[in-house]
Image (tube, rainbow, N blue to C red):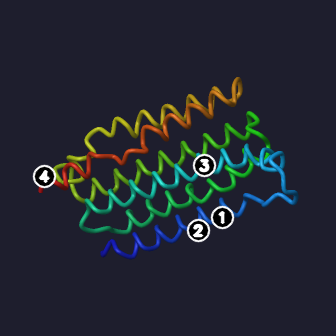
Amino acid sequence: MNKNRLEAFSDGVLAIIITIMVLELKVPHEVSFSALADLAPKFLCYILSFVYVGIYWNNHHHLFHAVQKVNGPTLWANSHLLFWLSLIPFATAWMGENHFQSLTVALYGFVLLMNGVAFGILVRVLVSLHGKDSLLGRAIGTDFKGNISVVAYVVGIAVSFFSSWLATAIYAVVALTWLIPDRRIEDKLHTY
């Protein structure tokens, strides 16, 4: 099965997700710095979520650059990832609208957690299809960074009930670790 349709569909969904997020930023009705300051929580949430969607897009691109084909389980695993990614705008808006209250930060962390799990499932499905000795299988290895990220999300969710700002900082640190694209696949591609 050709992977191009899957990639094109995924790119379209991710573009829509970013569009939905930016539409949640309502223009203030008054012209003042205080009106802009009132948007700060929403804007901070938007920045964090935009970075996350960008990270997933970037790593999705690298992932599919390293594979030759897809199959039915791959399509379902990719749809599963897109489902969780599509919830980022809701979680972002709720957290920003409610100024990082604990429950909203916990839900945001849960959505991030499920995105991490879904991406991990997609990777495992692709490695299973191509084999552990494939370019992708060798590049992914034990996926230490992905596994640590999932653990960090769980910690962030737990911490959110005591300190929503610390939990948000944990989510931001995870994003920072992924800002530089995952070099494992790119490095393997350049050796062949």
Query: Distance from label 1 to label 4 (Cα)?
Result: 39 Å
Query: Distance from label 1 to label 3 (Cα)?
Result: 13 Å
146 left or right of 139 in image: right
Query: Distance from label 2 to label 1 (Cα)?
Result: 6 Å
N-term-proximal mark, 3 vs 2: 2
Q: Are marks 1 and 4 in contact (CB under 8 Å)?
A: no
Q: Which mark is residue 191?
A: 4
N-term-proximal mark, 1 vs 4: 1
N-term-proximal mark, 3 vs 4: 3
The quarter holding residue 167 reads top right
179 left or right of 128 in image: right
Q: Which one is in front, 34 or 118?
A: 34
Q: Which residue bears the numbered disc 3?
A: 47
Q: Which amino acid does label 4 sit on?
A: Thr
Does 106 appear above or below 188?
Answer: above
Q: What residue type is labelled 2?
A: Ile
Q: Which residue bears the numbered disc 2?
A: 16
Q: Which one is in front, 15 or 88?
A: 15
